[in-house]
Image (tube, rainbow, N blue to C red):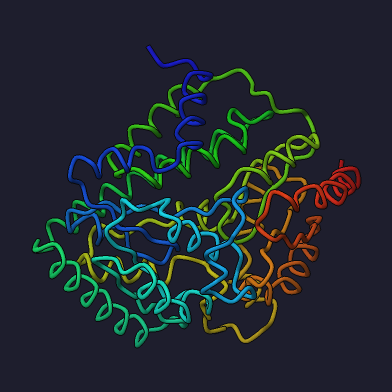
Amino acid sequence: MPEPQSDVVSRVDAMYQDYAGRAKELAGQGARFIGYVCSFVPLEMIAASGCFPFRIRGDVHEPITKGDTLLETIVCPFYRSCFDLMLKGKYDFASGVVIPHACDSMVRSYDVWNYALNLPYTHFVNVPSVCGDSALRFFEAELISFKQSLEKYTGVSITDEKLAHSIRAYNLNRKKARDIYALRKTHPPAILGSDLVKVLSVGASLPVEESNELFDQVLQACSGANKTDAQSGPRILIDGPCLDNMDLIKLIEDCGAQVVGDTTCNGARDHFPLTDEIRPPVQALADRYLNKLNCPKTYRDNQAGTFEKDADNRFGDIESYAKDYSADGVILYVYKYCDPFGFEVPARKTYLESKNIPVLYLEDLYSSGATGQLKTRIQAFLEMIG
């Protein structure tokens, strides 16, 4: 008999509040965790080495203190928060950390992480910023270097068989995440947006097999549920970078709206693209992480030659998700100093408005103290589209 929805949600909330609790427990039993901070890190490679990937989370309720002594304050506040918590020992069970070539904040501060944390294992994954055949070949070679560094650290040979097994496990995880997302298509959604953020956040802190079990429990508890506590207000989609704290979602819900979809780094942008299980594993991983993750840091050659076609290639997924989830409007949410998303705000906003999708642009400091300033603007936006 499926576990009641309230029980599952309560358990997820407890794990969300005690983020890393299960990882600490497993680490105490000898498991090795490797932290990462971005969707560009190939989790399948880490898992195939016998280690467990662990998504390093920031905390909007924790002032950044130690982190600001080593990183400039014009660095993305989300990234500084992650670094700050690492310095404070929040994730001291992690034996290593992997940082990819994503935004400039990550690229330029990798050496700071490496020096300040002095972990047994650190690695920088050089993800190309362009797509194309030459970039794909370069990235395949980079993933082989990543594989070799993990093999040297763990003493474990990462075979194609192990990689294929890991790819299947993570594809299954992403398919289950898609199924949970589908629960938000109903009117009202069968799972609150704030609860989904918690589920995905907790899932990223667990070994993939445990994450799959958790997702199954959520699906069983929420599927066929008659209703949630969601009000019958406007349906909102969130677009932006990593949204690993549920405070913004909860604020929107408290204003009377339903958050039914997203295109965020730790949400649909990360969980929807799958890895080809037929191709050689390294090639398949290179293709997924370079070509299928639609991040503004990656330039995709405009083969069509027109601005309209280029905009469709870059932002069409937002429009598609907005339609699929019957969104009445989009909140474009960007952290201060997040250059990849910040540079694209005018183009994203113009594109969505050209598709007759109302847009509210919010810039935030990744701090719970700033949420009150957002409330008035969110309420006004909801009244406009309601």
Is residue 146 shown left or right of residue 255?
left
Q: Position of residue 349 (x, y in %)?
A: 76, 67
Q: Is residue 314 toward the left or the right of residue 34 in the image?
A: right
User: Where does the N terminus fall, quadrant-wise?
Assistant: top left
Query: What count of labels does the image hold?
Result: 0
Depth check: give the residue in front, 238 or 81: 81
Closer to us: 151 or 32: 32
- Residue drawn where x is 68% and y is 63% of the image: 334
Q: Measuring 33% from the left and 50% from the top, which residue is drawn there? A: 171
| Quadrant in which the C terminus is drawn | top right
Residue 39 percent location from the top left of the image: 44, 62
Q: Is residue 361 above or below residue 111?
A: above
Q: Residue at x 73, y 53 (%)?
A: 330
Residue at x-position 43% and y-position 76%: 112
On screen, 61 above or below 309? above
The quarter holding residue 292 reads: bottom left
State the image coordinates of residue 372 (x, y, percent, origin top left).
80, 47
Q: Is residue 363 left or right of residue 382?
A: left
Note whether 81 is above or below 287 in the view shown: above
Choose between 124 and 120: the one closer to the eye.
Answer: 120
**Residue situated in front as seen by the camera: 157 or 219:** 157
- Based on the displayed image, in which of its 4 quarters is residue 314 positioned? bottom right
> Where is residue 240 shown, x and y percent of the image?
63, 60
